[in-house]
Image: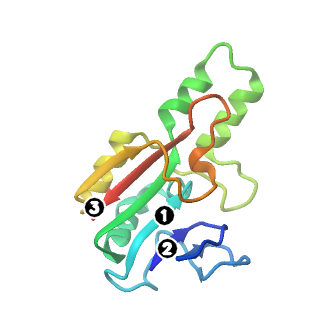
């Protein structure tokens, strides 16, 4: 099985886990509790702009849980807001207030509902350290996953605002 966490786009070969029961959702749940899935039962997990919603105190256990359910040689595709890039956009003296507010929303979440809060910010080094400490063998940064039409490729100000990483079990 391939699992798209936080997804909305139905795609053949992928099941959707979402915290909200919406059309097309196969499993209702949270990325920080994958207890409904057996060990080594998922080939690939895709999570675009979901992992920053995990509270700091739950990050390590969440990654250990993801590692637990992924099959040997499986992949975890994770896309998060690139805090380094967003900080550059925010501190740019030429950036108008509208752009600064948009950058802040990508850093802290849009806060349109109780789930749209970002609890943690990521750069590649920090994310890589957490992934390796959770048991993943290899971590690589990629420009694009080319799997879903989502925020992982969002580039409103030039470069994509996402940090896209593949972690290998």
Residue 114 location in percent, x, y?
Answer: 69, 61
Residue 10 location in percent, x, y?
Answer: 65, 72
The residue tagged 1 is: 46
Q: Residue at left 52%, top 31%?
A: 85
Secondary structure category for the residue under label 1: strand
Secondary structure category for the residue under label 2: strand
Residue 102 location in percent, x, y?
Answer: 70, 35
Quadrant of res 24: bottom right
Q: Residue at left 45%, top 56%?
A: 78
Q: In the orientation shown, which residue stands out farthest toward the top?
A: 93
Q: CA distance from mark 2 to mark 1?
A: 6 Å
Secondary structure category for the residue under label 3: loop
Most foreground residue, 158 or 22? 158
Kindly report which numbered mark, 3 or 1, lies closer to the viewer in this rendering: 1
Q: Give the answer, above or below, for where 33 lies relative to 97.
A: below
Left or right: 121, with 73 as reference point? right
Most foreground residue, 55 or 143? 143
The residue tagged 3 is: 134
Say whether disc 2 or disc 1 marks the residue closer to the N-terminus.
Answer: 2
Left or right: 41, with 101 as reference point? left
Contact flag, marks 3 and 2 (Cβ < 8 Å): no
The residue tagged 2 is: 3
Q: Give the answer, above or below, for where 43 lies relative to 138.
A: below
Say whether disc 3 or disc 1 marks the residue closer to the N-terminus.
Answer: 1
Q: Which image quarter is the N terminus in?
A: bottom left
Say whether disc 3 or disc 2 marks the residue closer to the N-terminus.
Answer: 2
Residue 137 location in percent, x, y?
Answer: 22, 58
Kindly report which numbered mark, 3 or 2, lies closer to the viewer in this rendering: 2
Contact flag, marks 2 and 1 (Cβ < 8 Å): yes
């Amino acid at each position: 099985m391939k699992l798209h966490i936080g997804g909305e786009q139905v795609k053949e070969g992928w099941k959707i886990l979402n915290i909200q029961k919406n059309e097309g959702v196969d499993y209702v749940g949270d990325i920080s509790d994958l207890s409904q899935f057996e060990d080594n039962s998922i080939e690939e997990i895709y999570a675009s702009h979901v992992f920053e919603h995990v509270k700091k105190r739950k990050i390590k256990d969440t990654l250990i849980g993801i590692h637990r359910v992924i099959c040997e040689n499986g992949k975890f595709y994770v896309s998060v807001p690139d805090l380094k890039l967003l900080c550059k956009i925010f501190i740019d003296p030429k950036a108008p207030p509208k752009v600064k507010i948009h950058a802040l929303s990508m850093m802290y979440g849009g806060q349109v509902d109780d789930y749209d809060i970002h609890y943690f910010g990521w750069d590649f080094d920090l994310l890589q350290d957490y992934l390796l400490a959770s048991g993943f063998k290899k971590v690589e940064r990629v420009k694009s996953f080319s799997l879903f039409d989502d925020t992982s490729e969002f580039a409103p100000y030039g470069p994509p605002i996402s940090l896209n990483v593949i972690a290998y079990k």
